[in-house]
């Protein structure tokens, strides 16, 4: 059995029956085209956390019992003339149009709020027909000071206000968030003037920004990635047709992946969006390596078709092994909970499978067709690919033991930052760096306290739809505790209307005045639960949210409300993300161990596994040092990028060791085998790393911070891996020659250098 566990036979079967292989390739491509007609990107961040455990289940129980503020659209109103009677009446009309919008289930604003009257009716909280600025200012100030809800909607200096739009879930499900936001934007543009500035924000707007950014990234990544890959191949081969041949297989691999993932999962996410680029660049690297090897065989005088046969026999096993190690890297990510990560891991594993299948079928078929059309690749590779090799050989020969010991010592020292890294998460990292709605949310944070809700669900006796006195007292207690941590006026619940009940109005009259849609956010339909909602700043990170929840939990427990639950998307994302990042860190360690073991099994040599440890650990440890020293620490994509970059980086090590093992089998000395491998494999490793770095660099331009971070860390890891493969790996092999071969096989030169 070969180091590729026999998977290279797929390439040999392609050469034996090219027409049958071509028919299968075309049929699968047609299936992928069908999948691409359904291509879309899902911006629902809840998909990332689905199935993560107790926090997710707690959040879903909340969603089943209450209408929450999680899907609301916030309309931020700014005006230097807010107290102008004409301006306030114009905004009243805007509030009325919001209420009758086809997507509206209701609204919450100074104009939608009504106050109960002594005769059992209700009147607008902001009086109609005011004629002077003083009247308007007095009305807004009184409303803000006497109504707790309005404290979270009207700015203290009367320079702005917030209107909350509650979407109709049925209408939203039928027509989608994009249509709703477009409708609201049309309305906003109609009312926006020199005196009134209007901005939309909130979760639906954030998701649309994420969706638009992800869609834009997808096409930029694919087009720019292919163009840059082609240019890199052109510089390497110095011929247009050679570069085109090397580019076709990666393009097909990415196309197959997009079609397959769409057929399986129905949509891409902002995470699986990255996979298509990874598959593209990995397929580019393997295609370049394959073509460079075939070129060298042809230039050594072997007939081109025979050279193709030999390339499949010699390169495909190593490519199969590299595919398996990268699949392992993706597979370890499944240890972390959450549907989003599961889909990312499965998509990555599928991507590696289709990339290898394309390499074993599409590339040989392309080369066969090119040869049939008379194509000849005469030019040698660019000198830029061979320039670093003499220096690498010299270092490996002159001071192998020094380099080997230094590498081991550095790896041990870098374990300090490795174990010092901590999970870090902030919700805003999910959103585009140029997010206008996130900037507006920050302004709302500063003005009235925030648009990120955190909920306390308080169980009640459920004996009355308007609550018994005992239940109301429990709710008041929870409300006061929440205000202690969120701030006065930053909490909404059915206990927010004491100013009316103190005046003698019954709770039933108050509930009647506020309307059914707001009541559904305060008390469950059966009266068995009440909801206390605190609004926190959007800018809070996971650590701050966790501390707030811990303090709130302690306060509720001390008050005897141990059965109250604290939840919300902000709470879910903070706790689940921290746990998921910690699990991903463990999966990285597992990926390293399993890949090293697989190398040992494939080569049937524990020594080969031992050789591979330091050169492949150093790039990861070095990148972790960068994360630690820069204060970035561990985020979602930082851990994922380390895991996947390791899976990619180990590919070059496998190609190096595969050629080295063949050289040793031919009877070459350890030093001679290293020299031969550096001469023949080194340029291909440089070319493939260049392709990988160029491809991953495309990710850095993403407006999504997590994707850009993924690209940056991948580039750092891959460059460090190249140094490990052409300098550290040869030095370890030569410097450790006493360990890696019996003494009787060592030449005088090798004994001396060791």
Image (cartoon, helix red, strand yellow):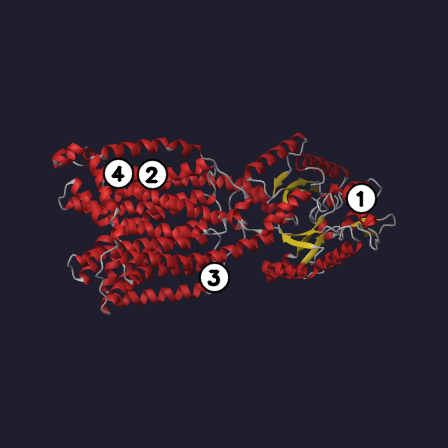
* C-alpha separation, residue under disc 4 versus residue under disc 2: 11 Å
Q: Can you say which quadrant of the picture contains the C terminus?
A: top left
* C-alpha separation, residue under disc 1 versus residue under disc 4: 76 Å
In terms of image quadrants, where is residue 543? top right
Judging depth in this view, the residue of 171 and 408 nearest the camera is 408
**SS type, badge 3:** loop
Residue 88 image offset from top left, x and y in percent? 77, 54
Q: Earlier in the sequence, mark 1 or mark 3?
A: 3
Q: Earlier in the sequence, mark 2 or mark 1?
A: 1
**SS type, badge 4:** helix
Does 644 sit left or right of 243 as displayed?
Answer: right
Q: Earlier in the sequence, mark 3 or mark 4?
A: 3
Judging depth in this view, the residue of 47 and 209 nearest the camera is 209
The label number, if any, that marks residue 374 in the structure image = none
* C-alpha separation, residue under disc 3 versus residue under disc 4: 44 Å
**Closer to us: mark 1 or mark 3?**
1
Residue drawn where x is 49% and y is 52% of the image: 270
* C-alpha separation, residue under disc 1 versus residue under disc 3: 53 Å
The residue wearing badge 2 is 617
The residue wearing badge 1 is 142
Residue drawn where x is 48% and y is 49% of the image: 340
**SS type, badge 1:** helix
The residue wearing badge 3 is 39
Res 235 seen here: yes
């Amino acid at each position: 059995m070969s180091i590729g566990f026999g998977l290279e036979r797929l390439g040999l079967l392609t050469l034996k029956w090219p027409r049958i292989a071509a028919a299968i390739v075309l049929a699968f491509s047609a299936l992928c085209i069908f999948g691409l007609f359904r291509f879309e990107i899902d911006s629902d961040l809840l998909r990332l956390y689905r199935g993560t455990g107790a926090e997710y289940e707690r959040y879903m129980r909340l969603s089943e019992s209450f209408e929450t503020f999680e899907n609301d659209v916030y309309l931020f109103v700014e005006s230097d003339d807010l107290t102008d009677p004409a301006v306030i009446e114009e905004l009243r009309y805007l509030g009325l149009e919001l209420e009758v919008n086809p997507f509206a289930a209701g609204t919450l604003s100074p104009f939608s709020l009504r106050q109960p009257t002594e005769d059992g009716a209700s009147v607008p909280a902001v009086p109609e027909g005011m004629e002077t600025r003083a009247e308007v200012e007095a009305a807004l100030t009184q409303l803000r000071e006497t109504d707790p809800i309005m404290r979270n909607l009207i700015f203290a200096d009367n320079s702005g206000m917030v209107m909350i739009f509650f979407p109709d879930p049925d209408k939203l499900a039928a027509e989608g968030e994009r249509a709703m936001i477009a409708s609201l934007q049309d309305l906003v543009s109609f009312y926006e003037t020199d005196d009134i500035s209007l901005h939309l924000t909130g979760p639906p707007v954030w998701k649309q920004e994420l969706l638009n950014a992800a869609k834009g990234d997808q096409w930029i990544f694919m087009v720019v990635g292919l163009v840059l890959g082609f240019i890199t191949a052109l510089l390497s081969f110095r011929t247009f047709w050679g570069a085109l041949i090397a580019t076709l297989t990666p393009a097909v691999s990415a196309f197959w992946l997009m079609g397959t993932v769409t057929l399986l999962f129905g949509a891409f996410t902002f995470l699986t969006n990255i996979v298509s680029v990874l598959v593209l660049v990995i397929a580019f690297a393997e295609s370049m390596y394959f073509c460079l090897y075939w070129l060298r065989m042809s230039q050594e005088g072997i007939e081109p078709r025979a050279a193709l046969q030999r390339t499949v026999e010699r390169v495909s096993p190593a490519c199969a092994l590299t595919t398996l190690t990268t699949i392992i890297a993706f597979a370890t990510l499944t240890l972390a909970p959450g549907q989003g990560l599961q889909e990312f891991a499965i998509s990555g594993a599928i991507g590696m499978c289709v990339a290898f299948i394309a390499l074993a079928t599409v590339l040989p078929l392309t080369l066969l067709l090119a040869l049939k059309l008379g194509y000849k690749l005469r030019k040698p590779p660019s000198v830029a690919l061979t320039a670093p090799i003499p220096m690498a050989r010299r270092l490996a020969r002159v001071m192998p033991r020094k380099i080997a010991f230094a590498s081991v010592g550095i790896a041990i020292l870098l374990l300090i930052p490795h174990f010092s890294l901590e999970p870090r998460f902030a919700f805003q990292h999910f959103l585009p760096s140029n997010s206008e709605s996130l900037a507006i949310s920050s302004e709302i944070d500063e003005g009235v306290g925030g648009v990120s809700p955190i909920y306390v669900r308080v169980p009640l006796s459920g004996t009355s739809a308007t609550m018994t006195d005992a239940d109301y007292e429990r709710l008041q207690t929870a409300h006061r505790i929440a205000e202690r941590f969120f701030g006065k006026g930053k909490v909404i619940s059915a206990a927010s209307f004491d100013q009316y009940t103190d005046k003698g109005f019954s709770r039933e009259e108050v509930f009647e005045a506020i309307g059914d849609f707001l009541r559904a956010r305060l008390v469950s339909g059966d009266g068995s639960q009440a909801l206390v909602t605190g609004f926190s700043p959007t800018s809070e990170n996971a650590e701050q949210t966790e501390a707030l929840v811990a303090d709130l939990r302690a306060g509720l427990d001390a008050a005897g409300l141990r059965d109250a639950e604290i939840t919300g998307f902000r709470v879910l994302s903070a706790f689940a993300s921290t746990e998921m990042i910690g699990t991903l860190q463990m999966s990285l360690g597992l990926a390293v161990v399993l890949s090293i073991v697989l190398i040992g099994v494939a080569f049937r040599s524990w020594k080969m596994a031992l050789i591979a440890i330091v050169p492949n650990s150093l790039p990861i440890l070095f990148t972790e040092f960068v994360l630690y020293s820069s204060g970035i620490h561990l985020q979602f994509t930082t851990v994922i990028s380390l895991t996947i970059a390791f899976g990619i980086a180990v590919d070059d090590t496998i190609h190096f060791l595969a050629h080295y093992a063949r050289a040793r089998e031919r009877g070459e000395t350890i030093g001679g085998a290293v020299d031969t491998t550096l001469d023949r494999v080194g340029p291909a490793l440089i070319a493939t790393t260049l392709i990988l770095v160029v491809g991953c660099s495309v990710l850095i331009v993403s407006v999504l911070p997590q994707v850009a971070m993924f690209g940056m860390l991948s580039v750092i890891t891959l460059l460090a891996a190249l140094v490990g493969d052409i300098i550290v790996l040869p030095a370890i092999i030569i410097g450790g020659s006493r360990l890696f071969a019996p003494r009787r096989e060592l030449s005088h030169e090798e004994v001396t250098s060791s």
